[in-house]
């Protein structure tokens, strides 16, 4: 189940990876300590991968590098897929309505404004937000805001979705519901997903693979073999949660 | 007049500080606080200083001249303010562009902001006197007193934008210009507005002296003074025309209060929707 050694890049030649990190190191300056050191992994298409690890371990930096927001100090990040991101606090623009925020996701798409508006409305409908289209983020609940963020990410039909702790700012019930919605989107659309989470439970419930990011590198890699949907109280799930917990230094 | 709350249509939304919901305010309170109270203060202090409590009717004829002077001063302020925005916003954006730029530019801004601009006013007047652009001297000195508030507020505003929101523009494929127009400028609106209010306050301070050029340069004569409310106040003060002085001061207070009520307060209320939680 667990692959103790670093991932063997040659094992994934059967399908072209959607993202690959090759010996990637990253730091914010030549005199500042490295945040990531010699990180190598790759993601196959249509997989759901979750990165877990202690705070300050480099999880979010991995996501920023995967999204090309940052450039590695050394090594190579390859990502040629249409990539979108869902943020921890939705990162909506407070002066725009839900519809206008989703339209931001259509900026680089071809089509007339009317066509883009139709797409944005369809994306909102898919997230059950039609009646909230003209509300600003302040008028929406935390869960509704996050769903607007998801609609914004999905409106351009991305191949690769990055999720930066999308449920951590929500209450348990909303987080649970939203994680099921994310899973439904994954099953329906087949978008490759890479999620950063502080919750090992979420990782085991959702992921095909779990990467443990600690000390600035991928310290461990766990394959989750159970079929989805998974139950939080299932013995196999509980055992795997306990196992992953042991790999994380601070826990 | 009863202070019983007026019917709903007479209630107005008045700016309340961030975090507090807008609340209906009685129309009497709305005008009493920003206009009547400062006016009473000015009238009271004017009476103590000059013995005049009300403006004598002989100065009613000066009304048109005072209004024209107010218009001239306002135009100077407006030109200097627009120039401050055009220079201050790019300066702030430039300073925030990189840590290196920030480490060089912010100390420079600090020094320039702290510089007593009136100490250099004689040199500035001399320069513009030679160029035949006395109006330029006044506008330049007002601009110089305003621009730093704008630049610093832009730097502060940029730091308030969450990193995730900055990332949205890049990840969702917005061009540099689209990121500036769609994200950066609206996000900077509340901070720039605060900077503008401070800038205009500094501008009102300086406009009084910027028009009385002869007082600051041995090369300038009284004839070089620029027509405006500031030069009238200085001349009336020096010439002992107390009633004119009080009239000009009252006009100044009313104008500042009206600008606050009908420009800054609505804009501050509007800026709430541009703030990040």
Image (cartoon, rainbow, N blue to C red):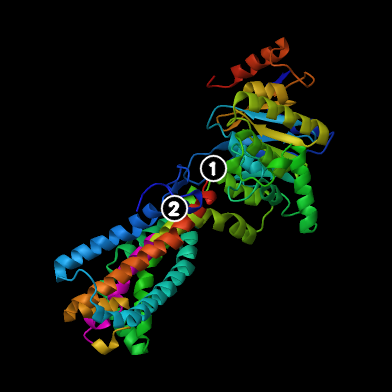
- In this view of the protein, can residue B13 be seen by the observer? yes
Instruction: Look at the numbered disc 2 and give the secondary structure of its residue.
Output: helix
Residue B277 vs residue A187, the one in the foreground: B277
Whole-percent x and y of residue A129? 71, 39
Between the C-alphas of marks 1 and 2, the distance is 25 Å
Q: Residues within 10 Å of mark 2 (few under 14, many from 20)?
A: some
Whole-percent x and y of residue B182? 61, 56
- On the image, numbered disc 2 is attached to which residue? B156
Whole-percent x and y of residue A243? 64, 15
Given this view, does label 1 or label 2 mark the residue nearer the observer? 2
Q: Chain of mark 1?
A: A
Whole-percent x and y of residue A113? 76, 57
Residue B252 vs residue A55, the one in the foreground: B252
- Magenta residues? B198-219
Q: Main secondary structure of the magenta part?
A: helix
Question: Is-magenta flag for residue B203?
Answer: yes
Q: Chain of mark 2?
A: B
């Amino acid at each position: 189940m667990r692959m103790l050694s670093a991932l063997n890049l040659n094992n994934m030649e059967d399908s072209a990876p959607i993202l690959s990190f090759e010996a990637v190191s990253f730091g914010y300056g030549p005199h500042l300590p490295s945040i990531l050191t010699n990180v190598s992994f790759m993601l196959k298409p249509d997989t759901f991968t979750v990165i877990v690890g202690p705070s300050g371990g480099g999880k979010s930096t991995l996501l920023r590098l995967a999204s090309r927001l940052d450039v590695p100090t050394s090594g190579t990040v390859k990502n040629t897929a249409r990539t979108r991101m869902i943020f921890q606090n939705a990162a909506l623009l407070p002066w725009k309505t839900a519809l206008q925020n989703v339209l931001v996701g259509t900026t680089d798409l071809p089509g007339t404004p009317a066509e883009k508006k139709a797409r944005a409305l369809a994306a909102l409908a898919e997230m059950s937000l039609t009646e909230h289209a003209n509300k600003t983020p302040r008028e929406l609940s935390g869960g509704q805001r996050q769903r607007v963020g998801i609609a914004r990410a999905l409106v351009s039909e991305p191949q690769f979705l990055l999720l930066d702790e999308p449920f951590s700012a929500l209450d348990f019930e909303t987080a649970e519901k939203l994680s099921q919605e994310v899973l439904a989107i994954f099953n329906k659309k087949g978008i490759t997903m890479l999620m950063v989470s502080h919750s090992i439970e979420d990782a085991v419930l959702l992921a095909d693979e779990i990467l443990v990011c600690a000390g600035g590198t991928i310290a461990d890699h766990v394959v989750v073999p159970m079929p989805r949907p998974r139950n939080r109280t299932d013995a196999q799930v509980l055992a795997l949660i306990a196992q992953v917990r042991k790999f994380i230094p601070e826990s | 007049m009863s202070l019983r709350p007026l019917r709903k249509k007479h209630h107005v939304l008045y700016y309340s500080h961030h975090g507090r919901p807008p609340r209906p305010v009685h129309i009497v309170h709305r005008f009493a606080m920003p206009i009547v109270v400062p006016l009473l203060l000015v009238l009271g202090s004017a009476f103590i200083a000059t013995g005049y409590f009300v403006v004598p009717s002989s100065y009613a004829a000066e009304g048109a001249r005072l209004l024209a002077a107010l218009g001239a001063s306002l135009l100077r302020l407006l030109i200097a303010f627009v120039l401050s925005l055009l220079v201050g916003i790019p300066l702030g954006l430039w300073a925030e562009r990189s840590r290196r730029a920030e480490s060089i530019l912010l100390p420079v801004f600090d020094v320039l902001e702290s510089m007593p601009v009136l100490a250099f006013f004689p040199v500035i007047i001399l320069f513009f006197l030679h160029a035949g652009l006395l109006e330029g001297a006044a506008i330049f000195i007002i601009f110089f007193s305003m621009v730093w508030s704008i630049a610093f507020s832009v730097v502060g505003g940029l730091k308030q934008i969450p990193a995730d929101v900055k990332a949205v523009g890049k990840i969702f494929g917005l061009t540099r210009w689209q990121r500036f127009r769609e994200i950066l400028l609206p996000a900077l609106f509340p901070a720039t507005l605060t900077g503008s209010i401070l800038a205009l306050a500094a501008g009102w301070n300086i406009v009084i002296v910027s028009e009385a050029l002869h007082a600051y340069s041995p090369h300038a004569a009284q004839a070089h003074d620029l027509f405006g409310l500031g030069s009238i106040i200085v001349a009336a003060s020096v010439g002992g025309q107390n009633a004119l002085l009080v009239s000009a001061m009252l006009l100044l207070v009313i104008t500042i209060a009206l600008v606050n009520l009908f420009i800054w307060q609505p804009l501050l209320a509007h800026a709430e929707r541009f703030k990040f939680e």
